[in-house]
Image (cartoon, grey):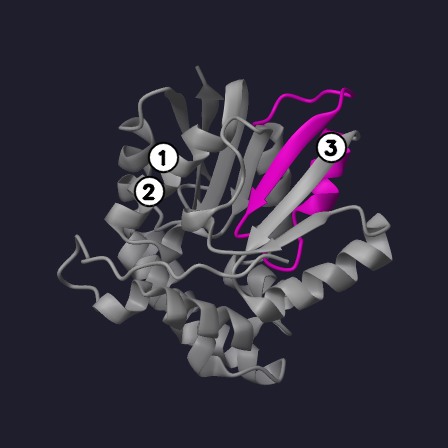
Amino acid sequence: MTEIPDRPAVALASPEAAPALYEADDVRTLFDRMATSYDRMNIALSLGFARLWRRQLLGLVGATGSRRRVLDLMSGRGETWSEIERRLPQAEITAVDFSAQMMAHAETRSRARFGGRVRLHQEDALNGTAERASFDVVVSAYGLKTFDTPQLERLAAEVARVLRPGGSFAFIDVTEPTSRALRVAYLSYLRWMVPLAATLLHSDPTEYRMLHRYLAGFGDGARAVEAFQSQPGLHVEVRRHFFGCATSISGRRS
């Protein structure tokens, strides 16, 4: 695994959000602490839709039996890899995450379920070591909300940098629904029921309250959409899933 370069602190575009919320060390520590329970809590956070949305995420990438180099950013414990291989059976997967504990679980998953063939890199997605134009596909599930606006712009630039011409990308994350009634119900669920579920599953509820704060800061995902749309060379499509409870940003590199 590669050494982790620090992500510099960046001033927030949203004044209502605390700067520490997006600092690399704090985000890394949060996910290190959540690593053991993240699989099951991710399902709780998304009201059980996490797996469906991962499948829909890969549905945005053209299926092929040909060999493809795939980069999984903010890969966590490797929860997206099965969907990658289902869609792209000859995929050569490279996974990037800066949480040491997430990477430890990912290494176990790679050995146990994928014959150790997933290439793992413990590094910041904003300071990646991949060569320019070295991947056919870039995907990511549920990592966008942990970035502020300047960081999202850097992420979009990194996607454009590592994709080969004609390559495709797809990101998905939970967002606030467009319906006011559904939004109130969903945010109340995330604020109160997810921490309760964390307690019942022997996790620290404080950590999962943080995810509610990230979602509140991320809103409907417009900042991420704008960051990708403003990146030269990326052709972007936006889709809302389940009345806006999740949003995908996908497209191709020209």
Magenta residue check for 192: no
Answer with the quarter of the image where residue 7 lies: bottom left
Answer with the quarter of the image where residue 92 lies: top right
Q: In the rendered view, would you say 21 is above or below 234?
A: below
Q: Are marks 1 and 2 in contact (CB under 8 Å)?
A: yes
The percent coordinates of residue 179 (x first, y second) are: 31, 46
Q: Nearer the viewer, residue 193 or 252?
A: 252
Q: CA distance from mark 3 to mark 2?
A: 26 Å
| Residue marked by disc 2 | 154
Kind of residue at badge 3: Ala
Kind of residue at badge 2: Arg
Kind of residue at badge 1: Ala
| Residue marked by disc 3 | 91
The kind of secondary structure element at disc 1 is helix
Tell me the crowding category of disc 2: few under 14, some 14 to 19, or many 20 or more residues within 10 angstroms, Cα based: some
Say which label, 3 or 1, has the lower sequence index: 3
Say which label, 3 or 2, has the lower sequence index: 3
Left or right of residue 252, residue 14 in this image? left
Q: Nearer the viewer, residue 113 or 40?
A: 113
Q: Which mark is residue 157?
A: 1
The percent coordinates of residue 3 (x first, y second) are: 54, 61
Q: Residue at x 79, y 29 (%)?
A: 90
Q: In the rendered view, would you say 179 is above or below 104?
A: above
